[in-house]
Amino acid sequence: MYSQSDKVMLTVDRVTKEFQLNGDASITALSDMSFSVAKNESCVLLGPSGCGKSTMLRLVAGLEEPTRGAIYLHGTEIIGPGPDRGMIFQTYTSFPWLNVQQNVEYGLRLQGMGKAERAERAAHFIDLVDLTRFRHVFPKALSGGMKQRVAIARTLANEPALLLMDEPFGALDAETRWRMQELLLKVIERSNTTVLLVTHDIHEAIFLADRIVFMTRHPGRVLEDISVAFKREVKFLQKEDILTDPEYGRLDRKIMRMMRREAMVNADD
């Protein structure tokens, strides 16, 4: 058991991840990563392409093991996948032979939950992601954004302590993307969800995050842990509202400069 504050949900403690190549060669994807995520916080991992963001998320999910260091959820070391973490990928993961209601109920049925209870819980989360009118529709008839809403509802219905999201809106068109970002903020607020999200999009990171962990180029390290402080007093639930805030512009420019510096270092290799 790892000692930590009651407010801290996730602790990444000096994590290094190496992958074996041919023979005795290896490559270091992450080096001495340390950060934490508080309960009900939305934390975004951001950095240049190839910095290890998705690898870090897979480690938290328990799909990979650290080479050195450890990761703790509620003070207990993560040693594999578990129902306390739910993961949403960029690709659509709905079962095509099940309708929306059945997809959201799927995990609950595997848990042995009774028919009436799982139907009620699924309906709650389907409503939360604004898909009530489509609950009997099959995935082939849904848009990309709707399919991701199904994935969010299905994951939240299992009540994970931590929601992990790997570029969840990356395959969507621009309009659908910002609508999904707004929806996610609504879902986070109404469900008191703790989120760790990977993106390469600076604007998305600032809009969604309470904190941004900015990573260096490969091998990934924490370059700066950035609090999005100007959002503490004002809730920006519509994308256009945040764009005119002076602090948004300041942070956008700061992160863009950081991203450019990391890219230039990479180009010099």
Image (cartoon, rainbow, N blue to C red):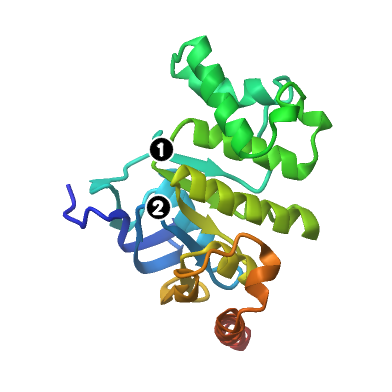
Position of residue 173 relative to residue 215, above or below, is: above
At label 1, counting other C-alpha atoms closer than 10 Å, the crowd grade (few under 14, some 14-19, many 20 or more) is: some
Q: Which mark is residue 40?
A: 2
At label 2, counting other C-alpha atoms closer than 10 Å, the crowd grade (few under 14, some 14-19, many 20 or more) is: some
Asked whether the viewer can see residue 22, the reply is no
Give the camera-side residue of 161 and 247.
Answer: 247
Tell me the amino acid under the disc marked 1. Answer: Pro
Is 14 on the left-hand or right-hand side of 59? Answer: left
Q: What percent of the width, then of the height, locates residue 159? A: 44, 34
Asked whether the viewer can see residue 101, the reply is yes
Q: Residue furthest top?
A: 115
* Mark-to-mark CA distance, 1 and 2: 21 Å
Q: Secondary structure at mark 1?
A: loop
Position of residue 77 relative to residue 103, above or below, is: below
Q: Secondary structure at mark 2?
A: loop
Give the camera-side residue of 260 and 125.
Answer: 125
Residue under label 1: 81
